[in-house]
Image (tube, helix red, strand yellow):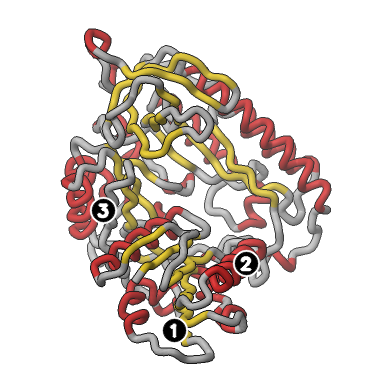
Amino acid sequence: MRVAIKTLGCRQNQCESEALQEALGRDGYTPVGPDEAADLCIINTCSVTNEADADSRQMIRRAVRRNPSARVVVTGCYAQVGAEEIAAIPGVALITGNGEKTRLPELIAGLCDQAPPRIAVSDIQRSHRFAPLLPAVNATRSRALLKIQDGCSYRCTFCIVPDTRGPSRSQTIEAALRDVRTLVEAGYPEVVLTGTHLGTYGRDLPIDGSISGLVAAMLEAATPARLRLSSLDPHEVGEELIGCFDRFDNLCRHLHLPVQSGDEDVLKWMRRAHTADEFRRLVDRLAEAVPGIAIGTDVIVGFPGEGDAEFEATYSLLDRLPIAYLHVFTYSPRRGTIAASMPDQVPKGERAARSAALRALGDAKWERFRQTQVGQSLTAVVLEGRDAQTGRLQALTDNYITVRLDNAEGAIGRTVDLTIDAVAGRETFGRLICGDERKGVGRRVEEKRNRPQVA
């Protein structure tokens, strides 16, 4: 039987979909592309916004329409909080929550022809143990995703994720190290650590753990592969983690630190755990300690109560800090969150104008950051996909720059040394370093300290 999995939303969903596809493959299913005809269609949904719910419903209806004889299974975050809404869509056979995701092969095997659909959604707030998830080994991918944490125990006022994912829970250190070794032995040159709230890793384990301690142990286990961290909240990055960049050459010089706002009052209304000043000091500290690091951030624009002064505080903070790139999100009320019923909702037009201004700032900062890397010798992983317009291969540098290459045939899935030659708008061009040019190439600490920084 042919199985197609369509994934919406975050990197964690992608990681879980890949593991599910591999598990179903072991059960005899033949994986096909998400838009191909299939006997079993699985939609792994997102619910971060009301629009994400609508996108999920649209994807479900499309799967039913395109595969009228297939069994359609819906899982993920929207399934966790909107099972009854999904059940009203004709053609759905099974709805499972996030707590049941690792049991999907078993639940699918037990399906019978029935209407209405079977709903298997447990109370995710009762989930206090990390559900084991064998890492997917996909020969077509250059980088592996490894989930080590799930859930979030914080309650930011704009966010529904604690309701869709449950409380924070961590994989054991022993299991995480085993999984990273499995991926390295499979030949992956890069492993990306993922989780709902990665920085809270280890707080729920019987023996106190931390993301910095796990990262240090993993970097030793992962050699020669490199390790990349997904998003971390600013207050979760301490000196121990910063020190890992100095100690290990295989930790990617890239951190994504969601600030969400640069105004102290807005951060309080959001119930964020950091202040704007703490974020400023952290970014400056990282730029000093880790030359060449790409620091990215998320910003929510138009949060209730944000006026011109609050927006200007955010713009000013991000403008003057050595941030490499911005992910700008225009605030939209998410039903079920505290912020949705807050007073002083910002008019749609103002939200759009402010978002456009920050996106323009983000584009300029990203170009400036890449310009600082022109002429630099960097390590990179050659990706499996080619540029759609030119057919060129692309490589991802350790500091998160996608570089188009002319001379990389045969290098897919390999770690290479390259030089960035030029930046043109959103595109970055480079070439592999060959022969004598390789002498001295590397990421030794003394070399890292001499690299230029973005202003």
Residue behind mark 1: 120
Label 2: few (<14), some (14–19) or many (≥20) C-alpha neighbours in 10 Å: few
Residue 87 locus on image (x, y percent) = 57, 83
Circles 2 and 1, Cβ within 8 Å, touching? The answer is no
Indicate whether 316 appears above or below 301: above
Q: Which residue is painted at 57% across and 39% down in the image?
A: 277
In this view, the mark in front (2 or 1): 2
Residue 143 locus on image (x, y percent) = 33, 43
Q: CA distance from mark 2 to mark 3?
A: 30 Å
Residue 101 locus on image (x, y percent) = 38, 72
Residue behind mark 2: 58
Q: CA distance from mark 3 to mark 1?
A: 28 Å
Of 36 and 276, which appears nearest the observer?
A: 36
Q: Quadrant of the C terminus?
A: top right
Checking the image for residue 248, the label placed there is none
Residue 433, image quadrant: top left
| Residue 152 visible here | no
Residue 346 locus on image (x, y percent) = 80, 53
Q: Which residue is painted at 19% across and 38% down in the image?
A: 223
Judged left or right of residue 153, residue 134 is: left
| Residue 141 visible here | yes
Give, as a three-letter code, the residue at label 2: Gln
Label 3: few (<14), some (14–19) or many (≥20) C-alpha neighbours in 10 Å: some
Judged left or right of residue 283, residue 384 is: left
Residue 269, image quadrant: bottom right
Q: Earlier in the sequence, mark 2 or mark 3?
A: 2
Which residue is the extreme one toward the top? Answer: 436
Q: How many marks?
A: 3
Instruction: Check disc 3 and report its element: helix, strand or loop.
Output: loop
Residue behind mark 3: 137
